[in-house]
Amino acid sequence: MPKTTPIRRRTWLLLGVLLVAALGLVVVSALPDADDTTAGGDRTAVGSTVPSAPASGSAARSVSPAPETTAPPAGQSEAVRRSLTTLDTLAVKGRAPRTGYEREQFGQSWSDDVSVTDGHNGCDTRNDILRRDLTDVALKPDTRGCVVLAGTLDDPYTRQTISFTRGPDTSAQVQIDHVVALSDAWQKGAQQLDADRRRDFANDPRNLQAVAGSANQRKSDGDAATWLPPNKSYRCTYVSRQIEVKSLYRLWVTPAEKDAMTRVLTACSGTAIPTSETASPPPTKTDRVAPASYFPNCAAARAAGATPLRLGQPGYRAALDGDGDGVACE
């Protein structure tokens, strides 16, 4: 076999290198351009859709549709929504036994010795509410502007207009209703309140409304599940007041009661729940004197417009006269 010369070997080596380079150019030219590929490496036409593989794990959860939320009914007022929200904060339980209930558990009827609005103003609670809820009020002279002799009631429960005249045969035509009845409260948490708090409850203007006596008698101690005002246009306000009072005094509702309240409020739609001034009009300044007993403190005396209190005046007591000069709450 003839020997290969060095020149010939170099020639064949050069040809081999050139052949390898040519083959490399062919392979590279066959690869797709990066700008024309999808993430999966497939060439796609402009405007075409490439199905993607199902996501897994947290990626799948991140692209899940957001859960649907329930929007408040169109036109439902903010006041109605607040009442529904407050209702959801009340405990829901069955009635406790009525055992032990007596009217006296809530203190003396229409006591002025309370820590709520109109307390210690020198007038009993019944007359405070009559002054607040009646129009064209006539007051009995020499009663410190407290005692209502006559007036007109536009009853929110029945829409009747009632002419009120004080007297043994006529006073019962207008009665003061406990919006949350005392017996109902007793069976839904008031047993756990102390005596002062129960007395406040029974005389709180937020829980009191002058109404037709006949409607008050029919209601008795019913809750929203067993009795609602015949005047349907007042039911939203009535139920909202019950919810407010039960929330203030930490009372509960029964399941049936909550269902009834919810039905009333969700039917209110755009109805606004009117807010009323809970305080009664104060007695006139000339009549605003100390009550026949005494004031618990100087703040109450000032609120009643009776200060300063002088020795010998109704309402004066030595405990309020810090310097012992015969003039208290100076």
Image: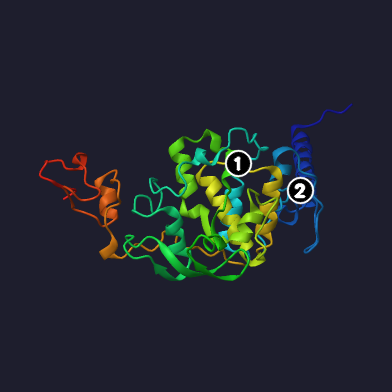
Point out the residue furthest to the right here. Answer: 1
Residue 161 picture location, percent across and down: 57, 72
Residue 198 picture location, percent across and down: 48, 41
Residue found at x 74% / y 56%: 36
Tag 2: Cα neighbours inside 10 Å, few (<14), some, or many (≥20)? few
Closer to the camera in the image, 51 or 319: 319
Residue 53 picture location, percent across and down: 80, 45
Q: CA distance from mark 1 to mark 2?
A: 81 Å
Residue 228 picture location, percent across and down: 67, 57
Q: Amino acid at mark 1?
A: Trp
Q: Is residue 23 visible?
A: yes
Residue found at x 21% / y 54%: 307
Tag 1: Cα neighbours inside 10 Å, few (<14), some, or many (≥20)? many
Which residue lies under the disc numbered 1? 252
Q: Are marks 1 and 2 in contact (CB under 8 Å)?
A: no
Which residue lies under the disc numbered 2? 28
Q: Is residue 198 left or right of residue 273?
A: left
Query: Image quadrant of residue 60?
Result: top right
Residue found at x 67% / y 62%: 73
Label 1 secondary element: loop
Q: Amino acid at mark 2?
A: Val
Point out the residue furthest to the front here. Answer: 168
Residue found at x 67% / y 65%: 232
Q: Is residue 258 left or right of residue 148?
A: right
Q: Mark on residue 84?
A: none
